[in-house]
Amino acid sequence: MSRVGRCAGLGMIAILLVTLGPVIRRPLAAQVRGQHWEVIPETDSATVGDTVTLRFRLHLDERDLLFDTIPRPAASTPDWVRVLQVDKLQRDSNRIFVGRARIAFYRTGRQPVPIFELPFMRSVKGLSRGTLPSDTASVEIVPLIADPSSATLRDIKEPPPPRGPGALVLVAGAAALLAAGWITWRVRRGHAPQPAPAAAPEGPPPAPPDPYEIAVARLAAVERERWSERDVARHYQAVTDALRDYLESRGVPARERTTSELRWMLPSGLLSDRTGGRFEDVFGDADLVKFARWRPDPGTAGAFLAEARELLADWSAARPAEKAVADAIR
């Protein structure tokens, strides 16, 4: 092929790439014709940790059908974004789906709102299932402190995995093999092993410690250490650690969850009207101290500890009620 022919072929390839590039790069979840999902923040500016309300307006084609009406984030949200609540979409008189979501940001500057999505189908053109993403939006987040350059997020490190009993099992197995070999050697030499003394009867095993009493003792230890005056960040961390460990003892995996994730997985009995408000106050203030470097005075930190005690008491009181309901269902 001549040089002119090769140049002409390369030119045709370049034209095809330019023409088809937008089509190739277009995501499969893009909005199709007849759809429009508006995301409208009710405020253009908010403070770190403040609740930002988003309004949803979803226009669908008359041939579309939603599989679900509760929007979900399209991807995992970063650590500095909290999805606090997402309401179910309702259809108004104009056949438009409307709803709200509440989120919070813990990093300053212009922050993008998470993209939400919904599964849908279209009754024609063979689209049996697709994903409808929302529009993009952003909110300006201003700091709580005078010097925003120092308000950086600390790294969130995963707790080290617990050590398993493998080493102890190996040691015990080796000891048993040695004992069996020694007994066999004595028998072969004509010396019967001495009978082992009869074991004394064991009493009933001690009752396991109550998780509520353990949590109360830990909160009392925090108060005795006076961390609210010496290191307020450690004070808030120690209080929330005691609450999370109490939830772990009741079967809720709370140690490795963010506040929003923990809110979604808590049983309904632990998020009643009063208890839910205390949960938001305690863990919301703890997030401000941890992520936004808010440093409250000792009086505020003492009130935080008292609120945590009340929340713990509410959780403990809700446990017998939950057990009674479960027994009644069985």
Image (cartoon, rainbow, N blue to C red):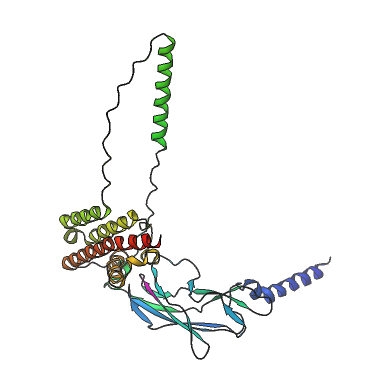
**Residue visible at 41% across and 22% down?**
178
List the single residue furthest toward the top: 190
Where is residue 31? Give x, y as percent.
58, 79
Up/down of 77 relative to 43, above or below: above
Q: Which residues are magenta?
A: 102-107
Up/down of 116 relative to 209, above or below: below
Residue closer to the observer: 10 or 116? 116
Q: Quadrant of residue 279?
A: bottom left
Q: Quadrant of residue 152?
A: bottom left
**Residue visible at 27% across and 67% down?**
282
Classify the position of the C terminus by image quarter. bottom left
Instruction: Specify the principal SS of the magenta part.
Output: strand
List the single residue furthest toward the bottom: 94
Where is residue 53? Give x, y as percent.
38, 79
Where is residue 86? Give x, y as percent.
42, 75
Classify the position of the N terminus by image quarter. bottom right
Q: Quadrant of residue 237?
A: bottom left
Total residue callouts: 0
Residue closer to the observer: 146 or 79? 79
In the rendered structure, the answer to whether residue 67 lies left or right of residue 263 reads: right
Where is residue 82? Give x, y as percent.
39, 69
Q: Is residue 26 magenta?
A: no
List the single residue furthest toward the right: 1
**Residue visible at 28% across and 73% down?**
144
In the rendered structure, the answer to whether residue 108 lies left or right of residue 308 reads: right
In the rendered structure, the answer to whether residue 57 lies left or right of residue 260 reads: right
